Amino acid sequence: MSNSSSISHFLLLPLAHTWQLQLLHFCLFLAISLAALLANGLIISAVACGHLLHSPMFFFLLNLALSDLGSICTTVPKAMHNSLWDTRNISYEGCAAQVFLLVFFVASELALLTVMCYDRYVSICKPLHYGTLLGSRACAHMAAAAWASAFLYALLHTANTFSLPLCHGNALGQFFCEIPHILKLSCSKSYLRELGLLAVSVCVGFGCFVFIFFSYVQIFRAVLRIPSGQGRHKAFSTCLPHLAVVSLFLSTAIFAYLKPPSISSPSLDLAVSFLYSVMPPALNPLIYSLRNQELKAAVWTLITGGFQKHLTAGKFL
């Protein structure tokens, strides 16, 4: 019997078995990661540099973009490396780091989406108290609480998972290190501790879902009471992007972890894991920028301003 101390590396699930398909997967991952880096980078720069975007909603959006960047940079580079060099290996320490970072960024995204829902609730249902409830100090405290709780949550899961003895080989049924697949390698009943933590995680996630659901019930009630059609449209335009991002995040994660075993297959599991780990960070900036005119204007100003500076600098060279 081997244990975790004798395992120097893990074997990840190969994305394909031919060089042509591996190259195709590499190009796909490269395109998605570059799109995610560019889109989230533009949002971060636009919010940080745009004076008109210095509001709680865009402050939390900046934090969400940082979380998305971290999430996609945790899984995609290693998958690209393995596809290009036809390998499955990831070191024991690298796997532990990947688990910690992935749990950290996913947990921070859920926490930030919940905080952003509270921001929309106060903005529409209690507009007169918006400045009091969501001042700069309160926003900083909420963002810090989201990141700190995600850090402690990830640290607890990672320490508990990698303290388990492993005796069922080192092959993982996933293209990145994921806790449920590592638990399948455990030969100790102590894995029940991790299952207990995962049960607590489900309860916390469900609690966030309930909070978001009932908040939007109150939001839609308040919006429908707005007398003017223009006012209702403006209120909906600020809520729909957040609701779409939450739906994308929760639906892919719920389907990945709660789908019936009868429909489970390696190819389906791979596709679902790709959807919930790679696609949300790439699509979130697009969802927010499509519906938010202020953000689109700030991003366009950032792009055209940089281009004009480049042309001006070229004239003096």
Image (cartoon, rainbow, N blue to C red):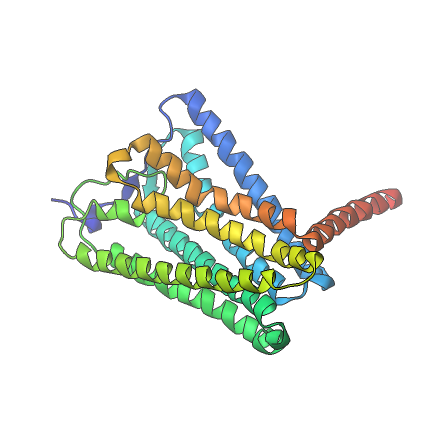
The answer, for residue 1, to whether it is visible in the render is yes
Left-right relation of 207 to 7: right
Outermost residue on the left side: it is: 1
Which percent across, then down, holds residue 239?
58, 57
Which percent across, then down, holds residue 158?
31, 57
Quadrant where the N terminus sits is top left
Q: Nearer the viewer, residue 214 or 261?
A: 214
Which percent across, then down, holds residue 316?
88, 46
Quadrant where the C terminus sits is top right
Q: Quadrant of residue 204?
A: bottom left
> From what the image shows, is residue 295 above or below residue 77?
below
Q: Nearer the viewer, residue 297 or 211?
A: 211
Which residue is pictured at 70% across the width and 52% down the height? 293
Which residue is pictured at 43% across the width and 23% down the height? 21
Which percent across, then down, holds residue 291?
64, 49
Please count the marks in the image: 0
> From what the image shows, is residue 76 above or below residue 86?
below
Left-right relation of 15 to 7: right
Which residue is pictured at 40% across the width and 63% down the height? 151
Q: Quadrant of residue 34?
A: top right
The answer, for residue 88, to whether it is visible in the render is no
Which residue is pictured at 78% across the width and 50% down the height? 305
Outermost residue on the bottom side: it is: 132
Q: Quadrant of residue 202?
A: bottom left
